[in-house]
Image (spheres, helix red, strand yellow):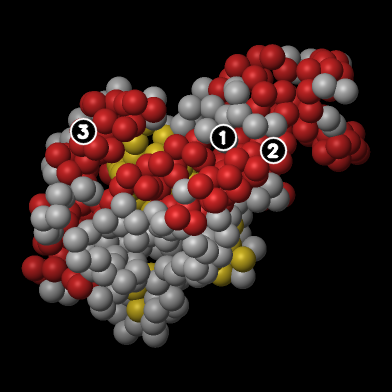
Amino acid sequence: MSVQENYELAKKAYEKWGINVDEVIEKLKNVPISIHCWQGDDIGGFEVNPNELSGGISVTGNYPGKASSPEELRADLEKALSLIPGKHRVNLHAIYAETNGEVVERDQLEPKHFENWVKWAKENGLGLDYNPTLFSHPKANDGLTLSHPNEDIREFWINHCIGSRKIGEYFGKELGTQALTNIWIPDGYKDIPSDRLTPRKRLKESLDKIFAVEVDEKYNLDAVESKVFGIGSESYVVGSHEFYLNYAMKNDKLCLLDTGHYHPTETVSNKISSMLLFSEKLALHVSRPVRWDSDHVVILDDELKEIALEIVRNDALDRVIIGLDFFDASINRVAAWTIGTRNMIKALLSAMLVPNEYLKQLQEEGNFTERLALMEEFKTYPFGAVWDYYCQKMGVPVRESWLEEVKAYEQEVLLKR
Ligand code: RNT
Ligand code: ZN
């Protein structure tokens, strides 16, 4: 049976439950995923004098073909994007600036250092998001940045973050789609602190200075990303969840929840509804922690499906900004992007193909038997047939056929690097 025939049958099964599959597909087309550029080069970046990756994050593996120039990274991203249905965004970090061989300190970065990225984004119909890079730098070697006891060091990072928000604003203006500029810092201590308050006070003051600078919200939104621990900050992280949750609420900023940044039995899916009750927008870094914040490639597991359900059933597709954050250097990096992003989209599609309103009603009525029965039955509804059709309709490879293209690209491009 053809993709089309399978689709027609699937459509009938969903229509019985009042789900209009064609409408679902139209809706899904307009949901952008912010694809992180750093999966393409193991968070290396293009600084003239690059520093080793630091900040308590780590990429393992040495699969051949890593991008080592902006041109290579963009070519790899284009390849991945050609295998992913829909129109999406690319998420950049400050270390991906292009300075023409000139050493430009991070606090001196300007929109002009991202002109090539913007030009490329325009050509490819992409939005851009941004992150200041507060790691992999001599001024962050002791694992402290915005909360550093030394004022000059704090000042340096404050200026870097202010400049970053302006770069985000530039992206938004140029591309006609609001950028998200997300601040994540590694600050913390390996061992039990003797003072938890003072570093947090300093972080608060630094953020106040960063956000005191006017940046047009029409073009740029600010987010802050919390964490529970990192390598070298096992005992204490300055920017914890409570810290940023309160900071964001008080200062009208977005909280960014990274799915690897909570205790192992704590789930982001269970946080989304609470967050949405108190703020208009929320941002995500969808990742996959394996025993720790390991940033494995996102797979279609229960938690990913639950996250998607929470976004869809709460009608929050335009309130939750979905970004990805994983980095695996042990497999083909173009495949990593493709697998992770396709899975995110699959999860959203599968969440849209559930009679969410009816299930809510069952819960309200206290009919937990039918609620459980239907939720389980829908797990084996023909969602795959709709996914295949969606890929075909969007002009990207159906099922695993994308892998052939990645293999060919590996032979023709990656292995020749
Ligand atoms: C680190 C954070 C952060 C980084 C990127 C590279 O734990 O998740 O988002 O992964 O900024
Ligand atoms: Zn993250």
Q: Residue at x 45, y 37 (%)?
A: 78
Q: Quadrant of the C terminus?
A: bottom left
Q: Nearer the viewer, residue 169 or 401?
A: 401
**Spatial CA span between label 2 and label 1:** 12 Å
In x, y percent, where is residue 122?
Answer: 32, 26
Q: Which mark is residue 401?
A: 2
Depicted 287 relative to depicted 254: above or below: below
Q: Residues within 10 Å of mark 1 (few under 14, many from 20)?
A: many
Q: Which residue is mark 1?
A: 84
Q: Residues within 10 Å of mark 3 (few under 14, many from 20)?
A: many
**Spatial CA span between label 3 and label 2:** 38 Å
Q: Which residue is mark 3?
A: 170
The residue mark sitting in front, 2 or 1, is 2
Q: Quadrant of the N terminus?
A: top right
Q: Earlier in the sequence, mark 2 or mark 1?
A: 1
In x, y percent, where is residue 14?
Answer: 82, 21
Which amino acid does the dot numbered 3 rest on? Tyr
Q: Nearer the viewer, residue 16 or 300?
A: 300
Q: Residue at x 44, y 42 (%)?
A: 77
In x, y percent, where is residue 302?
Answer: 72, 49
